[in-house]
């Protein structure tokens, strides 16, 4: 199937929980996939007043490759530029674990309060094949952990499966409201069948 035929997949699609393969050669097909990932992320946020398309992993388009795209400016929806990382890995976790809210383009209408390290060191390849290394902290560190989890077949809700008070949804005003674990989460086959 051609890259441009790919669409965003969501739970309960079991492919979201498969491990992605390393990219061997960064060629025009990989660059086309990256452009399409950026487009899919921007399409997702279109018409969503209270949400921003922050990042995407290739597996979210049913392409099991270790590729992620991360928006350059999370605070400005007008900035539609991204940075692509090929074969990203976290080389070191630093600081403490902090709980904060996460959502996911592949987990519809659900947010969770997820513990993540507040600092990480990452290495990857850029689109020219050059190795890049950097440190990230705060929200950017959270984004890296979330996206690299995707390449390892993990979705953010897997970190909080038994955390009864960790699940939320957005109301019409864009405020997060806590969900009833028993009613909305525990037996929700969309989330847990894989």
Image: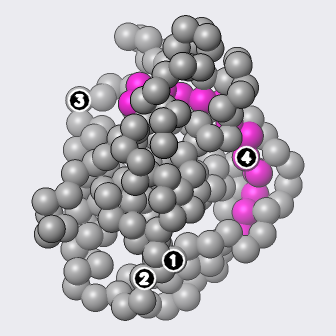
Q: Are marks 2 and 4 in contact (CB under 8 Å)?
A: no
Q: Is residue 18 magenta?
A: no
Farthest front residue in view: 194
Residue 133 position, x and y percent, is 63, 80
| Element assignment for label 4 | strand
Q: Which residue is mark 4?
A: 116
Labels 4, 3: front one: 4
What is the spatial separation of the Cα atoms under label 2 and label 3, in whole angstroms? 33 Å
Tell me, yes or no, if residue 100 can be seen here.
no
Figure quadrant of residue 121: bottom right
Residue at the disc numbered 3:
47
Mark nearer the viewer, 2 or 4: 2
Comes first in the chain, label 1 or label 4 = 1
Cα gap from disc 1 to disc 4, whole angstroms: 21 Å
The crowding category of the residue bearing disc 1, from other C-alpha atoms within 10 Å (few below 14, some 14 to 19, many at least 20), is many
Which marked residue is nearer to the observer: mark 1 or mark 3?
A: 1
CA separation, marks 4 and 3?
Answer: 29 Å
Q: CA distance from mark 2 to mark 4?
A: 26 Å
Seen in the picture, residue 106 relative to 167 is either above or below; the reply is: below
Q: Secondary structure at mark 2?
A: loop
Magenta stretch encompasses residue 113: yes
Q: Nearer the viewer, mark 2 or mark 3?
A: 2
| Position of residue 74 measured from the top left corner of the image (x, y, whole percent) | 47, 47
Q: Is residue 47 left or right of residue 99?
A: left
- In percent of the image, x 73 and y 63: which residue is there? 120
């Amino acid at each position: 199937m051609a890259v441009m035929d790919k669409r965003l997949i969501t739970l309960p699609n079991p492919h979201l929980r498969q491990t992605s393969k390393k990219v061997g050669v960064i060629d025009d097909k990989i660059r086309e996939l990256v452009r399409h990932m950026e487009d899919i992320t921007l399409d997702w946020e279109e018409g969503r007043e209270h949400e921003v398309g922050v990042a995407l992993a290739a597996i979210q388009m049913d392409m099991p490759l270790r590729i992620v795209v991360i928006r350059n400016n999370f605070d400005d929806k007008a900035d539609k530029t991204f940075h692509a990382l090929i074969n990203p890995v976290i080389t070191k976790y630093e600081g403490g674990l902090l709980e904060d809210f996460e959502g996911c383009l592949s987990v519809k209408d659900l947010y969770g309060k997820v513990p993540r390290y507040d600092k990480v060191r990452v290495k990857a390849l850029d689109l020219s094949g050059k190795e890049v290394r950097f440190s990230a902290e705060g929200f950017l560190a959270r984004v890296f952990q979330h996206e690299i989890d995707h390449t390892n077949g993990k979705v953010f809700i897997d970190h909080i499966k038994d955390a009864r008070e960790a699940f939320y949804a957005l109301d019409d005003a864009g405020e997060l409201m806590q969900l009833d674990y028993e009613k909305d989460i525990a037996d929700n086959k969309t989330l847990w069948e894989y």
